[in-house]
């Protein structure tokens, strides 16, 4: 497969700027791999494609308020600091991106308010820096009040107060993501009750989504593309529950490409899930033999993105592209705040 195989024209008008309310009233496009049929539904109908004994695997990562604005000591120059990942919790050391980068050098201090500041201790990339915060304990907590929601770059507006809640799934529990696992955004407590009532078990994994999810693929030959590493965790409890269901021939329904990558990263030779925590740079693109995922719930993704490639590996590129064409014609809303797709 080549990068150009995943090209399509996405009009700006199809990119959702805000989510629908309630969340489960977004549209749902259902793709049947066996019959090659495509049907349009409402997301709350997702429960009709689940059976007693099935597993619904979700990502419990929580988006934190990663975008900060501070002032450089002495000059008072305004600096944006985008928090990427925590490197050392005890010493409050973080990987960040700064803007404008030319003004930020090793040894500079950036002040965010009376209590919070950071010192630049290393350069990583042209805009990347390693910083040490003065806040002992929990930096996540410190930035919660003063940071802004890290909306994706294609949502061309400033973050609003409502985004703090909107850009967070109801499963969100573990701080660490700078982008939401968007397939999970469509679920409501009421819908979850229906799903559980049907006898479907909900199990969590964690994969902290990084900025790499928006980074363009720059090579035509996909074998040469390198994914950013992201932290993930699968608990013994989750792997045991999934493995029991696999033994009993029930479906593993996976919510989102991030959950899918975490599960497909941690597979035994026999095709079961093993408990694991660490970093994954797994890149899934066609052809790929999925070991754990039986059904996939996902959003509509940007052209030539690694997310679209994973979906195409699951449902065949031609079929996915046909569905995307139909979605644009049927006024589906695309990307993070957009509508959903379920692949059976």
Image (spheres, helix red, strand yellow):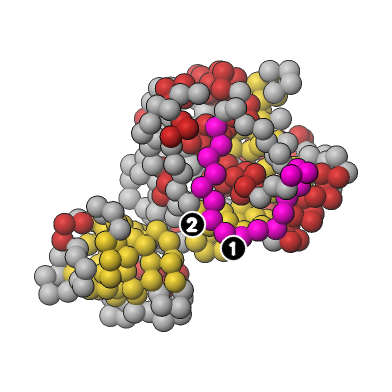
Residue 157: image location, x then y, percent: 33, 45
Residue lying farthest to the right in this orientation: 248
- Magenta span: predominant SS is loop
Residue lying farthest to the left in this orientation: 75
The magenta-colored residue range is: 269-285
Q: Can residue 46 be seen at all in this image of the molecule?
A: no
Structural crowding at the residue carrying mark 1, measured as other residues with C-alpha within 10 Å and reported as few (<14), some (14–19) or many (≥20): some
108 or 196: nearer the eye? 108
Structural crowding at the residue carrying mark 2, measured as other residues with C-alpha within 10 Å and reported as few (<14), some (14–19) or many (≥20): many
Q: Which numbered disc covers residue 173? A: 1
Residue at 40% across, 58% down: 84
Q: Which numbered disc covers residue 199? A: none
**Please, is residue 229 above or below residue 83 in the view?**
above
* Residue beneath disc 2: 177
On whether residue 247 falls in the magenta region, the answer is no
Residue at 43% across, 67% down: 87
Q: Are marks 2 and 1 in contact (CB under 8 Å)?
A: no
Examine the image and state in which quarter residue 219 appears. Answer: top left
Residue at 28% across, 54% down: 125
**Please, is residue 160 above or below residue 175 in the view?**
above
29 or 24: nearer the eye? 29
Q: Can residue 245 be seen at all in this image of the molecule?
A: yes
Q: Nearer the viewer, mark 2 or mark 1?
A: 2
Tell me the element at label 2: strand
Distance, label 2 to label 1, CA atoms, is: 11 Å
> What is the quadrant of the C terminus in the image?
top right
Residue 28: image location, x then y, percent: 62, 32
Examine the image and state in which quarter residue 9 appears. Answer: top left
Residue 165: image location, x then y, percent: 50, 57
Residue at 46% across, 61% down: 64
324 or 42: nearer the eye? 324
């Amino acid at each position: 497969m080549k990068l150009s195989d995943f090209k399509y024209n996405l009009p700006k008008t199809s990119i959702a700027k805000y989510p629908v309310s309630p969340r489960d009233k977004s549209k749902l496009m259902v793709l049947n791999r066996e019959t090659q049929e495509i049907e349009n539904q409402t997301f709350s109908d997702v429960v009709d494609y689940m059976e007693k004994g099935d597993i619904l695997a979700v990502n419990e990562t929580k988006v934190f308020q990663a975008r900060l604005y501070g002032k450089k000591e002495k000059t008072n120059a305004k600096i944006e600091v985008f928090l990427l990942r925590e490197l050392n919790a005890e010493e409050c050391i973080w990987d960040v991106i700064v803007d404008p980068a030319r003004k930020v050098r090793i040894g500079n201090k950036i002040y965010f308010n009376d209590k919070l500041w950071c010192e630049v201790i290393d350069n990583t990339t042209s805009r990347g820096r390693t910083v040490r915060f003065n806040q002992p304990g929990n930096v996540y907590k410190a930035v919660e009040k003063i940071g802004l929601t890290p909306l994706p770059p294609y949502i061309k507006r400033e973050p609003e107060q409502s985004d703090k809640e909107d850009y967070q799934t109801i499963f969100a529990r573990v701080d660490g993501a700078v982008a939401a696992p968007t397939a999970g955004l469509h679920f409501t407590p009421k819908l979850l009750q229906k799903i559980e009532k049907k006898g479907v078990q909900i199990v969590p994994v964690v994969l902290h989504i990084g900025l790499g999810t928006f980074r363009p693929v720059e090579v035509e030959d996909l074998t040469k593309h390198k994914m950013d590493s992201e932290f993930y965790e699968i608990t013994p409890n989750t792997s045991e529950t999934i493995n029991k269901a696999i033994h009993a021939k029930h479906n593993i329904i996976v919510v989102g490409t991030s959950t899918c990558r975490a599960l497909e990263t941690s597979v035994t030779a026999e095709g079961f899930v093993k408990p694991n925590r660490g970093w994954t740079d797994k890149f899934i693109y066609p052809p790929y033999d999925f070991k754990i995922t039986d059904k996939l719930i996902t959003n509509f993704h940007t052209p030539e993105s690694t997310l679209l490639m994973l979906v195409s590996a699951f449902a065949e590129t031609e079929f996915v592209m046909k569905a995307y064409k139909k979605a644009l014609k049927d006024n589906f809303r695309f990307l993070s705040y957009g509508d959903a797709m379920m692949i059976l």
